[in-house]
Amino acid sequence: MVLQPILALIILQYYRKSFNKNTIPGNWKILLTAGNVISIVMLSLFILVKDSRLVVTWLGHLFLLAVIIKGYLSTELKNARSILNAFLPVAIIYFVSYITSFLFKPFYNDWQNYFDVAEIFAFIWMIPMLIISNKQRKALEKEKLKTEEAEKVNQITQKLKAGLEIQVSERTAELTAQKEELEQTLIELKATQAQLIQSEKMASLGELTAGIAHEIQNPLNFVNNFSEVNTELIAEMKAELAKGNFEEVKSIATNIDDNEKKIIYHGKRADAIVKGMLQHSRSSSSIKEPTDINALCDEYLRLAYHGLRAKDKNFNATIKTDFDNSIGSINIIPQDLGRVILNLLTNAFYAVSEKQKQKIAGYEPTVEVSTHRNLLTGKDTGGEVEIKVTDNGNGIPQRIIDKIYQPFFTTKPTGQGTGLGLSLSYDIITKGHNGNLKVESKEGEGSQFIIILNL
Amino acid sequence: MKILVVDDELDVKTLFEQRFRKEIKSGEMNFIFAFSGEEALSYLAVNKHEAVLILSDINMPGMSGLELLGHIKQKFHEPPPIVMMITAYGDAENFKTAKELGADDFLTKPVDFTLLKEKLKIIN
């Protein structure tokens, strides 16, 4: 019987496979090699030395069983169990059959058919089991490969992740730095904006100075000269008194009185202009006070007009006013609203002066300021006041009309406008006075700005 | 002497009338007042050669004193009236422009009437 050493050899091969090629433990290398040698020696003896056959057969059986049992007992060979399950019935049944045939010959002879059938069944059992186990082994190997690949992918992922984390922290640092830089820039911009607002105030003050000079020198002219006239008249009156000419004295006294009234009137006029100028230049106090809106419009109209006239000798314009006297005093921040009116007027005068330069026949530059009180249309039914500044200049092109309130937007040549006038005006009216600033404009025909203040 | 005074300030009339009351009384001087450049021009168009001296403010709504000056010196030739400019802006540019346009003299506000009277005497 030569089957057992061959089966042992096959099983040993499976054992070897079930280890990874490179990871066979040292003692198992020895065991496997020894097992192979023993199997081959047994085969050789069986074939070459006829007298040894009986012993070799016995040893073959025992060796096969030993190999199988060793396999079952070794935890390292768990993967080989299914192989062993395939071989075990063959090994046992052949062994039992052999022992019986050897020790209980008559019994064996009686039952030989059954033994043969069992041997065949064991053999038949072995083949599909081997196939199944092979499949299982392959599946396991595949699984293992997959796991290994997954492991590799995982390792790569980990590496990438680590790299990404470094990148992310670098980016974060960069972004933080950028953010800080931007914050710094924002602070600087805010400071610059505050400076620009101040310089816009100063610029409009500059526009005013010429107007102010005119407006102050004219009343001063009267104050000085009427005072001098009065001095002369008093001397004359004294002379007439000495003569006893009382009718003449009376007439002179009336003149002196009239002149005195004019002196007071023009003195107050100069005073109001200086006060207005101071109000304009100082930072906004943001305190609302009852103000005569018509007087405010009139004052700034004169200042704006004379300011422009002082700069541009050739400029002239027709000025129209239409003041609603029913308005009375309304609660506003006078210097802020004055700034808005001045800005709208300066713009209006600029618009008509630009159109005047085109030398259109029959063109008469006209700027109109009107005030109007609507009793029923106000937000809280207290009514509203409209201040309209209208010019017949070139108008605002439709494509830029949405931009006119943007800070720094200007159509004036570089250096002539800060681009802050309307932007500040809009803020003053909407935020400072909870009102509304509207514009209506037709290209080529003129513009109208409407300030709406709720009462 | 006939003098046309052009100024948009209404009180200028009262002021001149008072300051020159003696001269007006004696008939030495005769004042006419216009309150805008346009008004002055229409007066001159009707009353040719009547105004010997024109005192004009520069800064007025509508036609400015300088425009008025230009019109007078171009249109009224033989001989054009003497024109003195009076302005609240005593700046060099205004002075230069006025001279270029043919102004005979240049005064600043507040008007020094003593000085003005002396100048008028010389002309007379």
Image (cartoon, coloured by chain):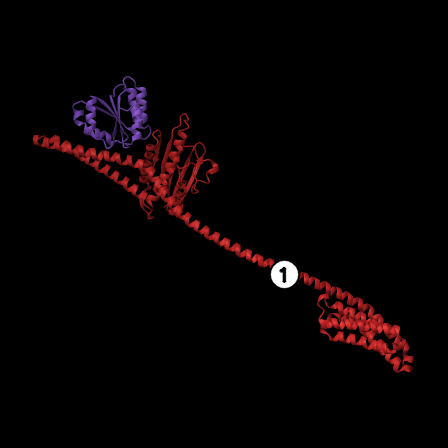
Is A104 left or right of A80, judged from the image as shown?
A: right
Whether residue A212 is visible here, answered yes or no, is yes
Chain B as rendered: colour: purple
In-image side of A189 versus B96 (left or right): right
- From this viewpoint, which residue is outermost toward the top? B78
Specify whether residue A381 is in view: no
Q: Quadrant of residue A248?
A: top left
Q: State which quadrant residue A334 falls in.
A: top left
Residue under pointer 1: A155
Residue B65 falls in image quadrant: top left
Q: Position of residue A276 (x, y in %)?
A: 30, 41
Is A12 rendered above or below residue B89? below
Tell me: A318 left or right of A175: left
Left or right for A365, reference B99? right
Label 1 resides on the chain identified as A
Q: Dot 1, crowdedness within 10 Å: few (<14), some or many (≥20)? A: few
Q: Residue furthest front?
A: A49
**SS category of the residue bearing label 1:** helix
Q: Position of residue A383 (x, y in %)?
A: 37, 45
Residue B11 to residue A7: above or below: above
Count of marks placed on residues: 1
Which of the pair A132/A424 is nearer the observer?
A132
The image position of residue A110, as x and y in percent, is 91, 80
> Is A102 drawn above or below residue B14 in the view shown?
below
At x 50%, y 53%, the residue is: A175
The type of residue carrying mark 1 is Gln
Residue B45 position, x and y percent, is 30, 20
Name the quarter where the N terminus of chain A is drawn: bottom right
Q: Spot the red chain and give its letter.
A: A
Relative height, residue A137 to residue A380 (above, below): below
